[in-house]
Amino acid sequence: MTKTSSSEGASPRSKDKTGFALQLVKWQRKSGRHDLPWQKVLAPYRVWVSEIMLQQTQVVTVISYFERFMNRFPNVQTLANAHLDEVLGLWSGLGYYSRARNLHRCAQQVLEMHGAEFPKDFETLQTLPGIGPSTAAAIASICFKERVPILDGNVKRVLCRLKGFDADLSISKHHKELWEVALKELPTAKADMPTYTQGIMDLGATICTPKNPKCSECPVQKICDANLKGNPLSYPVKSKRIKRTAQSLWMVCIENTKKEIFLEQRSAKGIWAGLYCFPTFSNEALCDQFINSLGAKNVHFEPVITHALTHKELSLHVVKLSGFSKQKLDNLFSKTLQNVGHWMSQEHWSGAGIPAPIRKVLIAMAAL
């Protein structure tokens, strides 16, 4: 198969810098998505939050999170002034919690260094925490009409199929070459940039999908290299796969006589950094030692919970202890636990930043 990356010369179609863009803009205005909550007002703050939420997360999941987030933090000032725990609480269940921490840090920098106004250019936007090239391009192109291409997963797939770009995207130089291809396909009119950017994301999300592309409905099917060759599923090419490892954790869910749950805040590094969790141990022996130190009598073992992260397959062994007095446990915890912990009622933990599998355990307990 012949590559059409920039280093080897583009196909004849790529010389037409406006054909694809014009057709895409026309299609988006007629058939693209227009009812997503972050599209109602194309403000930098809203576009930024939506782009961060949409990283590694499907639109259908993001919608309700975005609306709750906007209700609580309607602008960058309210987000910057909020406590991180509250931000993590609203993010709970979305996963990839470093996104929420970076969102909070970024809001503070925008407030302190830019007078609560987002920078209006692609390069400056990338100096902010958690904003990479694709997110910066989305903000700059949609809100400020800058001629700069986004290159998220959907867009990579569209461009690779459109141009027959079969260079391995797990190799950094090929990723840079695809960015050059994306740059050449931009519309010549800056006024078309917001529609074009939304259009290419819409095309990838609704038509040019990973497994079952709807090529017969595609507005650019006649100029799409992969469609003409009949092999859209061959693109994009990415040979490097994520290696997933397995890890077991032992957790102790402790309930006092007031029906409060003891949750400790995890350290700033590692999985679920900064979130509230049951006291957690790396092996069963340490967990048993902790339980014995409490003199626990009412012990209940939950079925093992399997939880998938990007790089890990977690097996969570949860042990429930109940019927303790808060004062007795506080004295013991001060000697046995390293992380900061709190007793939380259901009202308290409902709004705290808690990993999804732990929240499921708590909800199930509350329903009993």
Image: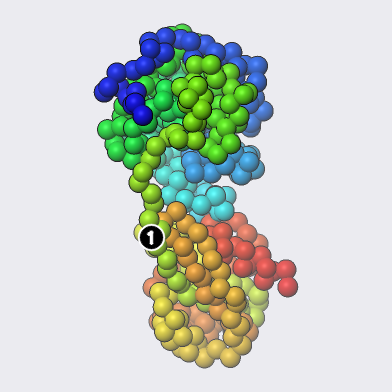
Direction from residue 35 to residue 186 in the image, left or right: left
Image location (x, y in percent) of residue 259: 65, 75
**Quadrant location of the C terminus in the rendered image:** bottom right
* Viewer-closest of 153 and 341: 153
Q: Secondary structure at mark 1?
A: loop
**Where 75 falls versus 93 (above or below)?**
above
Question: Residue 156, relative to residue 83: is it above or below?
Answer: above
Query: Can I make out residue 120 in this image?
Result: no
Front one among 306 and 169 = 169
Examine the rendered structure and indicate whether residue 45 appears above or below residue 276.
above
Instruction: Using the rendered view, name the quadrant where residue 131 is placed.
Output: top left
Residue 152 sits in quarter? top left
| Residue at 44% in and 33% down | 235
What residue is at 41 percent from the left and 78 percent from the top? Answer: 283
Quarter of the picture holding the N terminus: top left
Looking at the rendered structure, the number of numbered marks drawn on it comes to 1
Residue type at mark 1: give it.
Gly
Q: Is residue 273 above or below residue 262?
A: above
Q: Is the residue marked by circle 1 packed among few (<14), some (14-19), or many (20+) residues within 10 Å? A: few
| Residue indicated by mark 1 | 270
Residue 18 shows in this picture: yes
- Residue drawn at 48 percent across, 89 percent down: 292
Q: What residue sits 50% from the left and 79% below the top?
A: 330
